[in-house]
Structure formats: structure tokens, C-alpha cells
Image (cartoon, grey):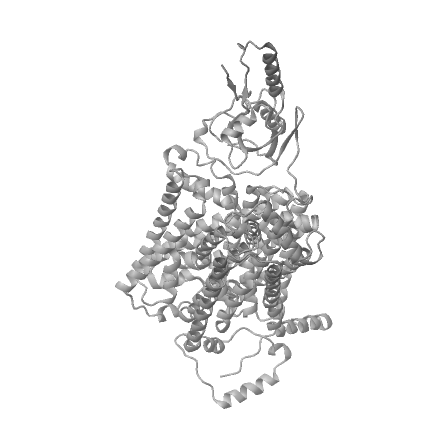
Amino acid sequence: MVLTNSHDGADRSLPNWGSSDTSETAEEALKALQTYKKKDGEKVIVRFKAVGNAPIMKQNFFKITSSNRFQAVIQFLRKELGYKGNESLHTYINLAFSPAPDDTVANLFKSFQTDNHLIVNYRLRYISPACWLRLPALYSVLYHQQSIAILMPFYNVLPQGAGYGVVVGIGLFFSAFMLGLTAIQARYTAFSPKNSEEFSSASRSVKPGLIASGIVSAWTWAATLLQSSAVAYKYGISGPWWYGAGATIQVLLFAMLAAKLKMNAPYAHTWLEIVGVRWGKAAHLIFMFFGLATNIIVSSMLILGGSATVTDLTGMNTIAACFLIPLGVVIYVVVGGMRSTLLCDYTHTTVLFAIIFVFIFTAYATSPKIGSPARMHELLTSVAQASPVPGNAHGSYVTMRSKNGLIFGVINIIGNFATVFQDQAYWQRAIASRPATTVKAYLLGGLAWFAIPFTFSTTLGLAAVALRGDPDMKTLSAEDVSAGLPASAAASALLGQSGAAALLVVLFLAVTSATSAELIAVSSLLTYDVYKKYFNPRATEEQLLNMGHYMVALYGLVMALAGLIFFYIGISMGWLYVRLRVLLSLIHILASTLHSSLTIKWQTFMGVILGSGVVPIALCITWKKANKWGCIAGSVIGFFCGLIAWLVTTSSLNGSVINVTTSGGDLEMLAGNLASIGVGGIVSVVTSYIWPDNFDFELTRTINRPETTSGMKPTITDELDDEKKGRASNEESASESAPVPVTSAEEEDELNPVALQKAFKFAAWSSLSLLLIMIILIPLPLFFAQTVYGVRGLEAWVVIGIIWCFMSAFTVVLYPLWESREALVQISRGIIKDIFTKGGGAYVAPKSSAA
């Protein structure tokens, strides 16, 4: 009889001892013995996770030879934690059971591996594993040489000191820089942050170039750069297009809402103020949930994603990064407010484009590894022949015919609506913009932003594919790609440590810039929609300004704590596991999605739970017939329909298994997003047609309207007045003729209903035309053509991206300088006067003429 022994993971047939052929039996026994003694040289990734009050390992992602017994893992863990033999330490696999010390790592891995690694949880005292939640942690690697387990930390491209240097050093440098700019602005211009209107809305006087730069900066997150490169790595050239176009159209369409905002509520501080005035307290509170939930999730992603990125590249402690990243940002936002945020956005955007150009010209012009589009095409073709891309035409990377890329594009489009339409940060820029140029700012900002993910990922994402097998290129697993590592791997392969350092700087700036946008946005919500509306309706100017400062500081702390909570989620809620499985599954999936902040899942998940509010909010601002209760019902019903569709689809497609892995699939997320946005929109629109309201937007136009313009319409001045103004203007000093805050007459003129209606129509046909071009007319014919591009095709693709990138840089870097040239001259003159006349350069407001 032949028996099978698979104790150590390898099937070994034992000899038939009853055989009459002695020599054959001896030979068979010898082979069996040699096979048993032979070590399995394969490595297994072991991931250590602390539970409860167990200390967290700085490095906790290890590799071990699979033939080792689990006892070797326990001994190594004790050594790393500094535990003695008599100290209690309990280990578990997947929080499910305690393995036997003599079991092999190979056997455990084959039976219980998760995402291609073996999760080993450890705790100081014994507790039933069923009562825990799995908590996220970082990775390290354990190597085994011969029979001795030794620690080999996971290779970080940059030293840990570089992480602290960037987060603390650059963070505080930018804080000091922005404090200096704020001081210069307050001394030499008419704008001072010591006024609540200037603090929260930059006196509604910002020109379109700076607003466009702020939009680009606020919409460029770490995930923008890393995930766009990841989809290029997976799907080829279709990935950059679908990532860029799928997240550009929301900003373009928002131009219509910005125009309607200026038309229907020109003095509002937040979009929730409009909801509250039009639909009352109940609607205000319901939509406040959607608004604040969006801000909290986005903020958590920024902090946790930024800290994880810094940790991956440098080994910096994640907890420290969670608190240090928002620190410098809070400092300059508290002091300078909205205008300081926009100036910082401009600085960040400038650095971002400079570094992107470095990567572009390195990859396509100077690098000996690639150096030209032709060489890139050759390398991509070689990789595609060896490893064809599933779902792509002929398995090629240089084709728009990518089924998975198209699916990603649809999900990306739907999921981003909630992120833009319900985030006060985007409304804040519309509020800060001058009425006459709001539409222009959003159209320029959206088109300029497209170049960033498109060109960046066409460079580093494709370079990561082309350099597979290069000695300087890290081998990327599926998990590495999901985490957004192709960009960092390609940057390091092309430019070494300098490339990794440049990427670290640009990712850090992306995080801090978006963080500043969230800080001032939530500060406005809490100040005007919570404090003033429910606690102090008669708040003075000074009280509102102070509250704005307090809320920025408070929310900075909340952001850090939120990132920390999602990092440690599960410890304090473990008891819920048995009693509330469904609720806990949702919380755990959300936490895990949030913790995987460098993937696209969090963004599409936001569409599932928050997308139902998109259409009702848009209708509230733009349509007088929007039914109050229909829109409220649409947002609430859509919320639950999105969750149900998501979970039902997950269950039906995955054999009734609902967990983090199965719920994050493309089709599952797509179903949830469509149900949430679709049901919310359908219910809102249908009820509004059946029971239409007839709302008079004059009520919302009175929100915060200054007394000097209350109920007044712009009047046409006669020629004599114009002549007097002209003579007075010629007599003004140079400092007085420079830019000053928008006067009431100028503002009323820009708020002319006819002009704003014309701006809305322009925004409508422009944004809808661009949507049609970017989502239908360009990609779909190329998709159905199934064309695989040759060298000339890829060259054209790259050149178009570079030209677009230059035009974008001109729009958001050079154009803001040009439109602010008078202010820059004014400031320069003031500084020169201060140097030579000791204090004579300070701005002096022009004297108003007597009536």
C-alpha cells in the first residue's frame, strides 16, 4: 500500500515495504529519505500584526524559508520583541486559531495565506480569536539563511531621516514661507486675514488663474499620482486616459454649479447655508451628514495615505506621520486663511509641474534605460509578448482596446461625483472667486488637471512596465501594484535615490495642499453651519473669525486622530464582532478600504455610501422646481439602495462570501455606485416633476448680503460722475491705484443676472461638450477600433501629453503671475519704500470721496 505524507507541504510517496525486489525497495527508500531531507527553498512572506496592548513592530513584514517549522517564527518574534521565555506571548493565524509549533510554514501558508502572505497575530495574553478584528499594519521581511532566522528589513529607497526631513523640515519651511507671504500681503495690500470674510472666502476677489491653480492642487492627491501610474501599469495607455478623463469631467461640470452659486446665493459661505435656507433644518442636518462624511473620509485618506507613502519610501513611523503631516499645514491656514491656502496651492502646483517635467524628459529623452518613445515602444512590446495584458487587444500595452480599462473608467467617473459635488473645498473656491470669472476658473482648472495624471502615469506607469527585468527595477507583486508602487519603483530605477526623493517631495506636497483645502472647508462648515446657525446666530465679526481659527486647529487634530483610528480600527470594537456581524463587516470593510488609501477602492466606496446626495444637492442650487421632500427622500433611499446593491452583488458574484476582498471588486463597486447615484437622482427628479416647488431664489440671494447692497440693483452712472472718477483716479498715488478689494458697485455689476445667466449657459455647453469629447468621441472609437499603435502612434501619444502638460503649466503657473502683475508691482514698491524710507511702504486705503 502506498501512503502520502504532506506534513511539510510536499507530497512524498512512501515505499511499499512488502515488495519482493530488495534492491528496488532500498533505492525507493533512499529516494524517499533524500526527498524528505531536501529543504524547500521557497520563501513565504509573514506579516506580523499586534493585537490589543501588544507592542507594534516597526518592521513587521518578513520572509522565511517555507520548510521551517512555526516554532522558528515564534522564536524570532520573541527575539524581536525582547521577550524572555517565561513571558506570555500568544500567536494566531488570521485571528482564527493557534498553530502547532511543529507545523511547517509551507503548510500554513498553503492553507491560510491571505493576499499572498501569512498573517501572524500576536498578543500578550490569551483571548478567543473570534472576538477580534483584524487590524492593518505595515510590512517587513524575514529571511532565513541555512537554519538561522535573521532579520533583513524591507528595503526602503530612502533613509528614515529623509522621511522626517521632508515631513517636518519641508512642512515647517512652507509654514514659515506662507506666514511670510501672509505678512507681506497684510502690509502691502488691502487684504488682511483679520476679517472673517477674507479668512473664509478671500473677500470673494480671487482671479481665475489662482483659483484654477487651487483646483489643480486640491484635486491632486498622493493617490492621483500613484494610482494613475498603477492603472497604466495594469492596462497600458488606456489607464492614463480613463484616470484623467474620469476625474476631470466632474470639475468641468462643477462650473455650472459655480455659476448658479454666484447667481442664486452670491454671498453664501457654504453650500449647506443654501440648503438650510431653502429646505429647512431637517434637510440641513441630513445633507450636513453627507458633507461632513465626505470631508472626514477624504481627510482621513489624505493623512493615512500620505503617512503610508512616507513610510513605504523611508520607513518613517506611520503614527508620527499622521500627526506631523497636518501640523505645518494648520499653522499657515490658521494665520492666513483662504488666501494663504490658495497661495500655498500655487507654490505646490509649481513644484509639482517642475518635478513632472523632470520625470518626462528623463524617461523619454535622457535616460540610458529608455531615452525615447521608440525605445519605450520596443520594451513595452517585448513585455506584452512575454506577459500579455488580459482583456487588451493582442495583449498589448499600446492600445485603447482594454476591457478592464474601460470598466475602471466607468467606475472612476461615477465614484468621483460624490467626492467633488459634496466637498466644501470645491464650493469654497467658487465662493472665493470673482463672479465674472468663476466659470473660466473651473474650466481652466479641470483641463489643466487632466495633464497631471495623464502625463505622469504615461511616464512612470509605462516606465515601470518597460523596465521589468532591469537590475535597478524592483519586482512588483500584484499587491505592490494595488498599493501604487509602480511610480516609486520606476522613479528609483530611472534616477536612483534622487528620483525617489523627488517623488517623495511631490507626494508630500500633494497631500499637504489637499489637506489645507479640507481644513479651511471644514472650518467654514463648522463656523457658519454649526456655530452660527445653531449656537450663536448673532455672532460678531470677531467671534466668527476666532471660531474659524479654532475650527482649523480642531479639525487638524481630528484629521490626525481619524487617520490613527483607521490605522488601529478594530481594537475597541472587537466585542461587536459576534453580536453585530453585518454592521461590523461594513465598518471593517470601510476601515480596510480607507487604510488601503493608495488604491482606488476608497473613492468608489464613497460613491456607494454618499453618491445619493449628488443630484439632490445640484438640484437645490440650480432648479426652482426641486421638491424638498423628494430630494431628501432621494438622498436617504439612494444611500440604502447603494449599500444593498453593493452587498447583494458581492454575495451573488462570490458565492455568498462578503469580506474586504470580495466587496472591493470592480463590478461590486460599480453596482453600488450606480444604485446610489441613480436612485437618488431618479427619486429627486421624478418627485420634483410630479409635485414641483416654485422656489424664489431671491430668498437665498439675501444670505449674508451686505447692508450696503441689500435690495439694491446696479445703477448706471452719468458721464459727469465718470469724469470726476477719472480725475480722482489720476490724482491717486501709485499705492492707491494698485488692486484693492472689490467695491460694492463693482461686485453688483459682476452679479448682473443677465451676465451670470450667460456665464451659466457657456459653462453648460462647454462642460457638456468636453464631457462628450473626453468620454465618448475620443476613447470609444479608439476602443472599438482595436488598434495596436506602432512607434509613431506612441510618439504622438507622448507628444500630445507633453504639449498638454506645458499648456497646463502655463495656465496654472505663469498665468496667475500675469493677472497679479499689478499687485506684485505694488508689493515691490512697498518693500522698496520700507527699505529706504523706514516704514513708508505700508498700504494706505484710498480716501472715499464725500457723497
Residue extending furthest toward the front: 21
Pick whichever, 581 or 269, lies toward us.
581
Q: Is residue 381 above or below residue 479?
A: below
Pick whichever, 370 or 706, lies toward us.
370
Instruction: Tell me the quarter of the picture where residue 257 sits.
Output: bottom left
Residue extending furthest toward the bottom: 720
Residue 84 in percent (x, y) is at 61, 22
Q: Is residue 336 visible?
A: no
Residue 204 in percent (x, y) is at 50, 69
Q: Is residue 410 visible?
A: yes
Number of marks in picture? 0
Q: Is residue 37 above or below residue 327?
A: above
Q: Is residue 216 above or below residue 647?
A: below
Residue 295 in percent (x, y) is at 47, 53
Residue 686 falls left or right of residue 651 = left
Q: Which residue is at a point 61% across and 51% down the rendered structure image? A: 381
Q: Which residue is at a point 48% across and 39% down the rendered structure image? A: 569
Q: Is residue 567 above or below residue 193?
A: above
Q: Which residue is at a point 65% across and 46% down the rendered structure image? A: 164
Residue extending furthest toward the left: 690
